[in-house]
Amino acid sequence: MLRRGMIMLSRSSAIKHVAATAPISRRVVSRFVPGEETADAVRAATELAALGFTSTIDHLGEDTLAAEQATATVKAYLDLLDALAEKGLADRAEVSVKLSAVGQALADSGDTFALDNAAQICAKAAEVGTTVTLDMEDHTTTDSTLSILTELRRDFPMTGGVLQTQLRRTEGDVRDLAYEGSRVRLCKGAYQEPDSVAFTSRQEIDRAYVRSLKLLIDSPAYPMIATHDPRLIDIAAVLAVRADRTQDSMEYQMLYGVRPDEQGRLAAQGNRVRVYVPYGDEWYGYLVRRMAEKPANVMLFLKSLTSRR
């Protein structure tokens, strides 16, 4: 019920206007999304780098159904990568790309169009000295996304992939991607999936995360451990010690504005910590989905909309 209600909220232009204009809610928005422009993303990456973090930057948008919009998204990424290089941040910031934002959902030619567009972004990233990670979306796109990842890695082997442990198939996908040089982001997954393809209880998803995490840490791949769950972070640390992993052979990833103290604690211990930075004018849907993932975030958001201060 909560998730359904928040999805409905994410489609409300009136609530978006309040969130964008009310002084207190603007502060909540800026906590999770640094802004709409390329300069905002670069500023956030610069600030994070000064604190000892790396970043992965997502130009917000998905489910693009027009070729022109997909092309505009590609240009936004190319401009972002040039701006990062100009600021000397190429070794501290990469980009995350949703294939549905660059044409995957287009009728008939979606996969080919998305592959060509993603290849443009990967080529620019390689030119300036950084990398790309392909975000994973709902289960209907998993096969397509992994197929495009395989094609991209022929020319751009450092392209990262994402696997969601709520999906029942993921342990098999981890085994397929757990090879030398393979960058794999492991997350629980934020999409509401049917029982037929996904675990639905918190306990099942957590256990599935640990199983996939062990496979990944014990492999020669490069694990990117994307979670804010303190129990899973502790388990990852124990597994890394058992596997004799060095701190530079893996990294932790967390969302911009979420558990910054924990991000600092992990970095202070010598771990690699990468912060996922979203930006762009499609921030509202992203923000509400993040709220839906955690009840405490929902209350923070709603309070910001109703407060008079």
Image: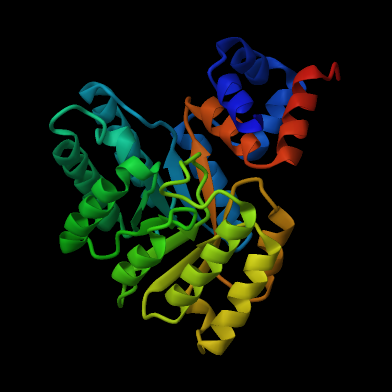
From the top left corner, tell me how far across and down residue 127 is, in percent: 24, 55
Relative to 56, is 116 on the left or the right? left
Q: Nearer the viewer, residue 188 or 42?
A: 188
- Picture mark count: 0
Q: Quadrant of residue 170?
A: bottom left
Q: Who is closer to the viewer here, 37 or 284?
A: 284
On-image quarter of the C terminus: top right
In the picture shown, does residue 265 fall above or below 90?
A: below
Residue visible at 83% across and 20% down in the picture: 307
Q: Is residue 267 visible?
A: no
Q: Residue at x 35, y 46 (%)?
A: 81
Q: Nearer the viewer, residue 32 or 104?
A: 104
Residue 8, compared with residue 128, is above or below; it is above
Seen at 36% across and 80% down, the residue is 220
Q: Position of residue 141 (x, y in %)?
A: 31, 43
Q: Colour scheme in the image? A: rainbow
Residue most extreme to the front:
196
Whether residue 48 appears in this view of the structure is: yes
Give how far across and how far down residue 177 sits, in percent: 31, 68
Horizontal placement of 67 versus 273: left or right? left
Task: Name which residue lies at 18% across and 40% down.
Answer: 111
Q: Quadrant of residue 247?
A: bottom right
Residue pushed farthest right? Answer: 309
Location of residue 53 in the rendering, given as x and y in whole percent from the top left corner? 57, 60
Quarter of the image with the N terminus in it = top right
Where, by quadrant of the figure, is residue 58 drawn? Answer: top left
Question: Please, which residue is most extreme toward the top here?
Answer: 14
